[in-house]
Amino acid sequence: MEISNLIAEIQHFTPELASSYCIVNVAIMKLDEIQNMGYDEFALRSKINMPLHLYRYYPNTITKDKETGKEVNYSTQALENNTVFLQTPTAYDDVYDSDINIDYAEYEHLRLIEYCKRCGIEVDNKRSTQEIGDIFVKTLWKYYTVTRKSILKKLTSLTSMI
Protein backbone atom coordinates (compact mmCIF):
# COMPACT_ATOMS: atom_id res chain seq x y z
CA MET A 1 0.00 0.00 0.00
CA GLU A 2 1.33 3.43 -0.91
CA ILE A 3 1.91 5.91 1.87
CA SER A 4 -0.71 8.32 0.47
CA ASN A 5 -3.32 5.55 0.52
CA LEU A 6 -2.34 4.69 4.09
CA ILE A 7 -2.78 8.31 5.13
CA ALA A 8 -6.17 8.45 3.43
CA GLU A 9 -7.27 5.28 5.25
CA ILE A 10 -6.10 6.61 8.60
CA GLN A 11 -7.87 9.92 8.03
CA HIS A 12 -11.04 8.18 6.93
CA PHE A 13 -11.37 5.75 9.80
CA THR A 14 -9.85 7.59 12.72
CA PRO A 15 -9.77 11.38 12.42
CA GLU A 16 -8.46 11.82 15.95
CA LEU A 17 -5.55 9.45 15.19
CA ALA A 18 -4.78 11.32 11.98
CA SER A 19 -4.76 14.63 13.86
CA SER A 20 -2.29 13.26 16.45
CA TYR A 21 0.37 11.82 14.11
CA CYS A 22 2.26 12.90 11.03
CA ILE A 23 4.74 11.32 8.66
CA VAL A 24 8.27 12.68 8.43
CA ASN A 25 10.28 11.01 5.67
CA VAL A 26 8.18 7.82 5.84
CA ALA A 27 8.46 7.63 9.64
CA ILE A 28 5.24 7.95 11.64
CA MET A 29 5.72 10.42 14.50
CA LYS A 30 3.44 11.83 17.21
CA LEU A 31 2.71 15.54 16.82
CA ASP A 32 3.28 16.09 20.56
CA GLU A 33 6.69 14.45 20.27
CA ILE A 34 7.63 16.66 17.33
CA GLN A 35 6.47 19.82 19.12
CA ASN A 36 8.55 18.99 22.20
CA MET A 37 11.80 18.17 20.44
CA GLY A 38 14.34 20.83 19.62
CA TYR A 39 15.59 21.82 16.21
CA ASP A 40 18.65 19.54 16.30
CA GLU A 41 16.69 16.44 17.26
CA PHE A 42 14.02 17.08 14.61
CA ALA A 43 16.69 17.64 11.94
CA LEU A 44 18.40 14.38 12.92
CA ARG A 45 15.18 12.36 12.98
CA SER A 46 13.96 13.78 9.69
CA LYS A 47 17.23 12.78 7.99
CA ILE A 48 17.32 9.22 9.33
CA ASN A 49 14.77 7.91 6.84
CA MET A 50 15.53 10.33 4.04
CA PRO A 51 15.27 8.62 0.65
CA LEU A 52 18.45 8.30 -1.38
CA HIS A 53 16.73 9.22 -4.64
CA LEU A 54 14.09 11.67 -5.71
CA TYR A 55 11.79 10.70 -8.53
CA ARG A 56 9.61 13.16 -10.36
CA TYR A 57 6.73 12.17 -12.61
CA TYR A 58 5.99 14.35 -15.61
CA PRO A 59 2.93 13.78 -17.76
CA ASN A 60 3.85 13.57 -21.42
CA THR A 61 2.01 16.74 -22.36
CA ILE A 62 2.83 19.92 -24.16
CA THR A 63 2.05 23.11 -22.25
CA LYS A 64 2.55 26.79 -22.90
CA ASP A 65 5.39 28.37 -20.91
CA LYS A 66 4.01 31.43 -19.12
CA GLU A 67 7.22 33.45 -19.43
CA THR A 68 8.18 32.75 -23.04
CA GLY A 69 4.79 31.83 -24.47
CA LYS A 70 6.40 28.88 -26.29
CA GLU A 71 5.02 25.36 -26.18
CA VAL A 72 7.20 22.99 -24.17
CA ASN A 73 7.14 19.36 -23.09
CA TYR A 74 8.73 19.36 -19.63
CA SER A 75 8.94 15.56 -19.58
CA THR A 76 11.12 15.48 -22.67
CA GLN A 77 13.10 18.50 -21.51
CA ALA A 78 13.82 16.88 -18.13
CA LEU A 79 15.03 13.66 -19.74
CA GLU A 80 17.16 15.42 -22.36
CA ASN A 81 18.76 17.96 -20.01
CA ASN A 82 18.71 15.98 -16.74
CA THR A 83 16.74 18.81 -15.13
CA VAL A 84 13.68 19.17 -12.94
CA PHE A 85 10.95 21.68 -13.73
CA LEU A 86 9.42 23.39 -10.70
CA GLN A 87 6.29 25.39 -11.31
CA THR A 88 5.21 28.32 -9.21
CA PRO A 89 2.77 27.63 -6.37
CA THR A 90 0.15 29.73 -8.15
CA ALA A 91 0.19 27.20 -11.01
CA TYR A 92 -0.53 24.19 -8.75
CA ASP A 93 -3.80 22.41 -9.40
CA ASP A 94 -4.50 22.09 -5.67
CA VAL A 95 -4.79 25.35 -3.75
CA TYR A 96 -3.62 23.61 -0.56
CA ASP A 97 -0.33 22.36 -2.08
CA SER A 98 1.49 25.47 -0.95
CA ASP A 99 -0.79 26.57 1.86
CA ILE A 100 1.37 27.51 4.83
CA ASN A 101 -0.32 28.36 8.09
CA ILE A 102 2.01 29.57 10.79
CA ASP A 103 0.96 31.02 14.11
CA TYR A 104 3.66 33.70 14.11
CA ALA A 105 3.13 34.66 17.74
CA GLU A 106 3.62 31.05 18.87
CA TYR A 107 6.57 30.63 16.46
CA GLU A 108 8.25 33.74 17.89
CA HIS A 109 7.67 32.50 21.44
CA LEU A 110 9.10 29.04 20.71
CA ARG A 111 12.12 30.47 18.81
CA LEU A 112 13.01 32.71 21.75
CA ILE A 113 12.77 29.75 24.12
CA GLU A 114 15.03 27.75 21.79
CA TYR A 115 17.54 30.64 21.54
CA CYS A 116 17.62 30.93 25.33
CA LYS A 117 18.12 27.19 25.68
CA ARG A 118 21.01 27.20 23.19
CA CYS A 119 22.67 30.11 24.99
CA GLY A 120 22.28 28.43 28.38
CA ILE A 121 19.68 30.93 29.62
CA GLU A 122 17.06 29.42 31.93
CA VAL A 123 13.55 30.77 31.25
CA ASP A 124 10.08 29.74 32.30
CA ASN A 125 8.16 28.69 29.17
CA LYS A 126 4.99 30.16 30.63
CA ARG A 127 6.37 33.69 30.56
CA SER A 128 5.19 36.03 27.82
CA THR A 129 7.16 36.42 24.62
CA GLN A 130 8.02 39.99 25.64
CA GLU A 131 9.39 38.83 29.02
CA ILE A 132 11.47 36.04 27.44
CA GLY A 133 12.78 38.48 24.83
CA ASP A 134 13.73 40.97 27.54
CA ILE A 135 15.56 38.27 29.54
CA PHE A 136 17.35 37.11 26.39
CA VAL A 137 18.51 40.59 25.34
CA LYS A 138 19.50 41.61 28.89
CA THR A 139 21.52 38.43 29.36
CA LEU A 140 23.31 38.96 26.04
CA TRP A 141 24.05 42.59 26.96
CA LYS A 142 25.30 41.60 30.43
CA TYR A 143 27.56 38.96 28.86
CA TYR A 144 28.96 41.54 26.45
CA THR A 145 29.55 44.23 29.08
CA VAL A 146 31.26 41.79 31.46
CA THR A 147 33.44 39.95 28.93
CA ARG A 148 33.65 42.61 26.20
CA LYS A 149 33.27 39.71 23.81
CA SER A 150 30.55 39.43 21.26
CA ILE A 151 28.34 36.39 21.50
CA LEU A 152 27.77 36.60 17.73
CA LYS A 153 29.54 33.30 17.09
CA LYS A 154 26.97 31.53 19.22
CA LEU A 155 24.13 33.51 17.65
CA THR A 156 25.37 32.81 14.13
CA SER A 157 24.65 29.13 14.64
CA LEU A 158 21.20 30.07 15.91
CA THR A 159 20.25 32.18 12.90
CA SER A 160 21.09 29.33 10.52
CA MET A 161 17.96 27.52 11.75
CA ILE A 162 15.56 30.32 10.84
Image (cartoon, rainbow, N blue to C red):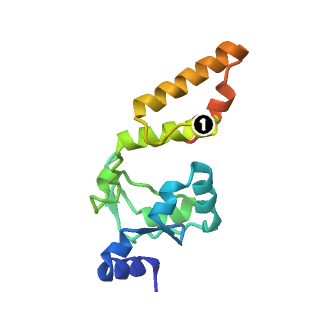
Question: Residue 86: where, in percent of width, then height?
Answer: 44, 55
Of residues 37 and 27, the one drawn nearer to the viewer in this rendering: 37
Residue 32 in the image, given as x and y percentages of width and height: 46, 61
- Toward the viewer: 138 or 31? 138
Asked if residue 42 shows in the view, the reply is yes
Q: Position of residue 111 (x, y in %)?
A: 49, 40
Q: Residue at x 48, y 25 (%)?
A: 134
The number of numbered discs placed on residues in the rendered structure image is 1
Left or right: 127 in relation to 55: left
Q: What residue appears at the point 53 percent right and 23 percent down from the top-left corner?
A: 137
Question: Along the horizontal axis of the image, is 43 left or right of 13?
Answer: right
Circle 1: is it few (<14), some (14-19), or many (20+) Cα within 10 Å?
Answer: some
Residue type at tag 1: Leu
Q: Of 152 and 6, which appears nearest the observer? A: 152
Q: Is residue 9 above or below residue 78?
A: below
* Residue located at (64% from left, 36% from top): 120
Q: Is residue 33 left or right of residue 101?
A: right
Q: Is residue 160 visible?
A: no
> Which residue matches tag 1?
158
Which residue in the rendered view is the most extreme toward the bottom?
1
In the displayed structure, does residue 19 sit left or right of residue 137? Answer: left
Q: Position of residue 2 (x, y in %)?
A: 46, 82
Residue at image location 36% in from the left, 47% down from the top: 102
Disc 1, SS: helix
> With respect to residue 77, does 125 lie above or below?
above
